[in-house]
Image: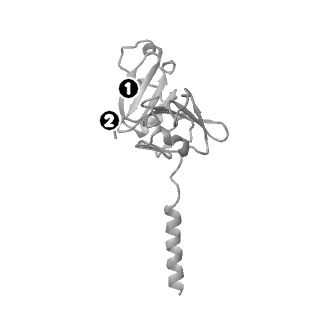
């Protein structure tokens, strides 16, 4: 009888452990919390049912969530800005996510409040683009890219828009202007 009770206890403990939700703030390849790469815009309402969804360009008589939306938590803190592939299609998938809340982080702790040093220490940089007012840093084998305001760069490269910027020229303490996730969907007709 004791073996049956002990076995029942272990089995029930395993079910409880397996039933736990995933970390709602963990960023992985193809997901950010409960938001997955294959989600359609019309599903945003159910994924963020406990949060506030602000439609930035509301479409009259829309059948579901369409266009860009901001997600706010229950305390009114801005979490995410979600941009679809197609603003007028509720079946559209998500193309970009701007992450505002520092609770969203990778398994190595990278978040919107991190510094460039954390990227250099934990990731390989795929490319660095020199834009007019920003530097865009792409992380190798990742959906994540970040932007850094050029005001944080040394003055000798800050105003030259054609020079190739190397990681060594970006100060370790440089903070992110934007922490972004981009999801490509090569086949959008499924």
In the displayed image of the protein, which residue is found farthest to the left? 187
Question: Which residue is at a point 49% across and 68% down the rendered structure image?
Answer: 14
Colour approach in the figure: one colour
Looking at the rendered image, the quarter that the C terminus falls into is top left
Per the rendering, the mark at residue 74 is: none
Front residue of 97/188: it is 188
Res. 109 visible in picture: no
Q: Secondary structure at mark 2?
A: loop
Give percent across and percent down for residue 45: 55, 42
Q: Nearer the viewer, residue 140 or 63?
A: 63
* Disc 2 crowd, CA 10 A, few/some/many (<14, 14-19, 20+): few
Q: Residue at point 48% right, 30% down?
A: 172
Which residue is tagged 2? 186
**Label 1: element kind:** strand
Tag on residue 128?
Answer: 1
- Nearer to us in this view, 162 or 184: 184
């Amino acid at each position: 009888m004791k073996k049956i009770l002990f076995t029942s206890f272990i089995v029930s403990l395993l079910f409880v452990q397996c039933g736990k939700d995933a970390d709602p703030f963990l960023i992985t390849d193809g997901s950010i919390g409960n938001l997955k790469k294959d989600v359609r815009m019309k599903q945003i309402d159910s994924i963020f049912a406990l949060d506030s969804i602000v439609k930035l360009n509301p479409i009259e008589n829309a059948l579901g969530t369409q266009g860009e939306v901001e997600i706010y938590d229950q305390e009114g803190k801005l979490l995410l800005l979600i941009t679809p592939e197609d603003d007028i299609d509720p079946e559209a998938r998500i193309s970009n996510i701007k992450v505002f809340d520092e609770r969203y982080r990778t398994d190595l702790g990278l978040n919107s409040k991190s510094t460039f040093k954390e990227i250099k220490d934990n990731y390989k940089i795929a490319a660095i683009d020199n834009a007019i007012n920003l530097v865009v840093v792409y992380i190798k084998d990742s959906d994540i890219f970040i932007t850094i305001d050029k005001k944080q760069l040394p003055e000798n490269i800050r105003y030259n828009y054609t020079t190739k910027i190397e990681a060594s020229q970006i100060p370790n303490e440089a903070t992110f202007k934007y922490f972004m996730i981009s999801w490509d969907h090569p086949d959008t007709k499924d």
